[in-house]
Amino acid sequence: MTTTDEVKELLSEPKFRIKLYDYVQDKASSAISSTAGEDFSLNVPLTPEAITSRLRRYEEVTSDLISAMTLIGFWGSSDHLKSATLPFKKFSAQFPPTLSGGWVSLQSYPLIILMYSLGIGAIAANNYDLLYGFFQSPMNTPSQGSGEDPLILAIRPQIQSVIELLKKLPDRQKQRTPLSEYLFEFFKGRIINTIPLEGNEYEAVFDRFELFFVLQLAHESQRNRQNHISGPFGRFAWKYGGGAIESAFGQLRSEALRANSSWPPLKSGFFGGLSKRFIEITELYELALQNLHW
């Protein structure tokens, strides 16, 4: 039985919820154990070739988890939230972000690809309850010295660290959004082979996930008095204002304004459940997009 078939079976009935948790725990432990080998040494030169190789190795050892997270995002519910957040808690405990730079920064890469896996799956299924619960899950990776942060805040500095490493790659140096472009390419074939998503739908789902991430991040940043409205920017940013076709940002805003307080993401808890708050955040974020001058 393939990973996809096994996870889908475990998601098919509530009685398998604990078995799914155990399955994810085994896969996460196996992935973490694999990163202890020589392929993940911190004592090798940080060359473009070595960075590319290290990215590929992280993708290989988390391959089963990537499929599992995508399927949980698409087929799961809030009852599966513990399984969804388990890999993040285990990886964060093993590789706490107390240091940054060089190879240490890349230790956060599995967290990023797993977040995208679950998020893309959830957006494809309009599974906003699960996605909101996932973003808000408390993590022991505090951004302000002590206590816990929501996952969405905890992962932001790690994303920025990986972006800086990707800029060292010759084929990424001129890209405006190198991490977003890299992950868009990585997931393209994988996603449509895991969940019922047509190839021509993938780009819109990918952009929509990144928009939900950055807008909810902006909301949480202001609530936590971090006041960060700029970035991280995804592929949607360079599409903003670029032609007659309404951008992903514009489409999302129009959809929310039409639905007002009945918009499903608000009912799930995004933006404090308030249409007014969504409008405030999108207005602030639009200013940041306009200041990019791309």
Image: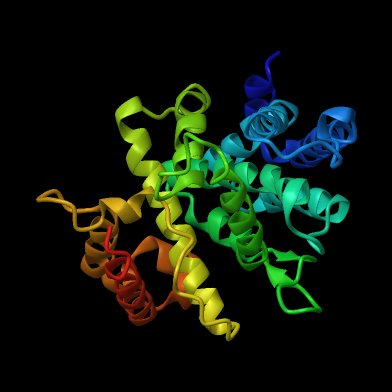
| Residue 12 visible, this angle | no
Rendered residue at 63%/23% (across/down): 4
Query: Relative to 124, is 79 on the left or the right?
Result: right
Q: Is residue 261 above or below residue 114?
A: below
User: Residue 14 at x, y = what percent?
Assistant: 69, 41
Is residue 3 something that shows in the picture?
yes
Q: Within the image, what quadrant is residue 92 found in?
A: bottom right
**Residue 140 lies in what quarter of the image?**
bottom right
**In the rendered view of the protein, which quadrant contains the C terminus?**
bottom left
Q: Quadrant of the N terminus?
A: top right
Q: For the view shown, which residue lies furthest in the top direction? A: 1
The total of numbered circles placed on residues is 0
Q: Residue at x 33, y 56 (%)?
A: 237
The percent position of residue 152, horizontal first and vertical second, equals 60, 63
Colour mode? Answer: rainbow
- Using the image as rendered, state which of residue 145 and residue 22 is in the foreground: 145
Residue lying farthest left? Answer: 244
For residue 97, above or below residue 5: below
* Residue beneath the point at 68% across and 52% down: 81
- Residue 77: x, y in percent? 59, 48
Residue 219 percent across, percent down from the top left: 48, 75
Q: Nearer the viewer, residue 6 or 179?
A: 179
At 37% from the left and 48% from the top, the residue drawn is: 235
